[in-house]
Image (cartoon, rainbow, N blue to C red):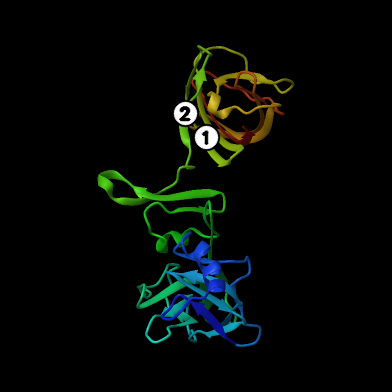
Amino acid sequence: MAIVSAGYDGTVDEVQWAALAPRVGRGRYGVVGANDWKVSPHPSTAQAVNVASGVGWGWGVLDDSDAIQTVQCDPITSGTRWDMICTHRDWTPPNGATLARKITGSSAKQLPPRDSTPGVSDDQPLALVQWTAGQTQPTAIVDLRTWAGPGGVIAKDQLVLGFLGDLGTCVRVADVEWVYGLGANDVPVWSNPDAGATYAFVDNLPNYDFNGPVVVKRVSPTVREIEVAVSMIRKGNLGNPMSSEAQDMGVVLPAAAIGAGNSVIGSSPLSLVDAAAGSKSTAEVFWQLRPSDGRLFIWSPAAFTWGTERLITLNCKFRVTG
């Protein structure tokens, strides 16, 4: 096994520079391919994992490993423990060195203390591995690798935010984007621009009291996820929801919650609360969002009585395009 590194003391040739330059400026850490430096259970050795071959970088050093590295963790006699598997870089002259190693953690699923002095000694997190007493194989592996391209960094678990703290960093974890920027009083903080905006809906039925939020969250450039939480108290004598046709609930959603195309149809549990009698019942109802005007309709497969001063709660969650 050999790890060839470029970026420690010594000369970097043209081939190494061509591989190193476009990568090390994109993110603090990274690996090149989908399977590079992936951590997996060792097939036969107890409390051991393998780190796959491949190319990765950190703090100006690019490392190319041509073989699997095996990392042996400590035995565990009770409970569970989370160890971190890292690529360790040591800049000690004359040449520096890179190797895979473990950092013994605790029962908490969190990043343990690690070396983090670039130019001296640093650990690049690759995975958190859970060991359980009585088991020889890992009971869980959390992938902490990152991939960096011209548009930002991607990762598989939110724990990576704990070691990517450079102002201006943009990281997409699954479908959620995180940005490390300046918060109140210029204190650095991670924020999620995709967390969603909250709107109020318009109600147009005079004999009902409405409240509840409409949360709109963008989950991709072309898709929004909508969650509507409706609470309605009947004040007048309008008809009960019909089992044979959709009935206008009087809820009109904001434009941000309406997509293009056909109606959105779904089903959700509806709760009917009679505060005076101290009773509560639940029924599965169908609902429909009409995109032409944002109106929400419901109908029930089974009839139920919606008396005056009785509260109905309904939560609808769906996705729209646009």
State the residue in front, 27 or 264. Answer: 27
Q: Position of residue 128 (x, y in %)?
A: 50, 71
Considering only order in the chain, which callout, 1 or 2, is on the residue closer to the N terminus? 2
Q: In which quarter of the image is the N terminus?
A: bottom right
Whether residues under marks 2 and 1 lie with C-beta atoms below 8 angstroms apart, the answer is yes
Would you place residue 235 above or below residue 322 in this image?
A: above
Q: Residue furthest right?
A: 244
Question: Relative to the observer, which residue lies in front, 314 or 301?
Answer: 314
Q: Position of residue 92 (x, y in %)?
A: 37, 84
- Give the distance between the C-alpha atoms of the residues marked 2 and 1, in whole angstroms: 8 Å
Number of marks in the rendered image: 2
Q: What residue type is labelled 2?
A: Tyr
| Amino acid on which disc 1 is placed | Val
Question: In the structure shown, which secondary structural element does the residue marked by tag 1 occupy?
Answer: strand
Say if 225 sits above or below 297 in the image.
Answer: below
State the image coordinates of residue 305 (x, y, percent, origin top left).
61, 22
Instruction: Tell me: 75 left or right of 222.
Output: left
- Residue drawn at 42 percent across, 61 percent down: 164
As drawn, the residue found furthest toward the front would be 14
Q: 293 or 16, which lies in front?
A: 16
**Considering the numbered disc 2 on the image, is that residue within a helix, a strand or a loop?**
strand
> Measured along the vertical axis of the image, is residue 269 above or below residue 169?
above
Looking at the image, residue 116 lies above or below residue 284: below
Q: Say if residue 106 shows up in the picture.
A: no
Q: Which residue is drawn at 43% across and 49% down?
A: 179
Q: Where residue 204 sits: x, y (%)?
A: 53, 14
Residue to which mark 2 is pinned: 199
Query: Which label belongs to residue 273?
Result: none
> Which residue position holds label 1?
216
